Image: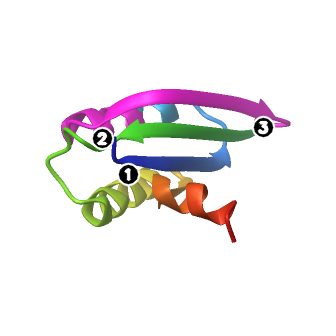
Amino acid sequence: MESAVVVVVGADKPGIVAGISSKLAENNVNIVDISQTVLRGVFAMIMVVDLDTSNVSIGKLRGELQKRGKELGVEVLVFHGEVFKYMERI
């Protein structure tokens, strides 16, 4: 499975999860796991997503999610899943 890790951080407000997950759905990206929390008004979410059925490259997906993040007023980071596997080996 080709995976990516999506990190979303910003001031909490309604619609962040819907905004990010709808963009993933538009690109046929499956959410494998999701965790979110709000600490003193700061929203933080981490998603592991499956890119195997996606119709876009990870670079294009990153750009689309960052654009959506700007619309929502949050920062979005997208990392290829393999990065985390190999970080432990270095």
Residue behind mark 3: 41
Residue behind mark 2: 23
Tag on residue 48? Answer: none
Task: State left or right for residue 59 relative to residue 78.
Answer: left
> Which residue type carries mark 1?
Arg
Q: Quadrant of residue 32?
A: top left
N-term-proximal mark, 2 vs 1: 2
- Where's residue 56, x and y in %? 18, 54
Identity of the residue drawn at 26% across and 33% down? 25
- Where's residue 79, x and y in %? 49, 59
Mark 3 nearby-residue class (10 Å; few <14, some 14–19, many ≥20): few
Disc 1, SS: helix
- Where's residue 77, x and y in %? 52, 59
In the picture, the quarter occupied by the C terminus is: bottom right
Boundaries of the magenta span: 19-41
Q: CB under 8 Å between callouts 1 and 3?
A: no
N-term-proximal mark, 3 vs 2: 2
Q: Nearer the viewer, residue 35 or 4?
A: 4
Identity of the residue drawn at 65% across and 30% down? 36
Q: Quadrant of residue 63?
A: bottom left
Q: CB under 8 Å between callouts 2 and 1?
A: yes
Q: Is residue 50 magenta-colored?
A: no
Task: State left or right for residue 85 relative to residue 54.
Answer: right
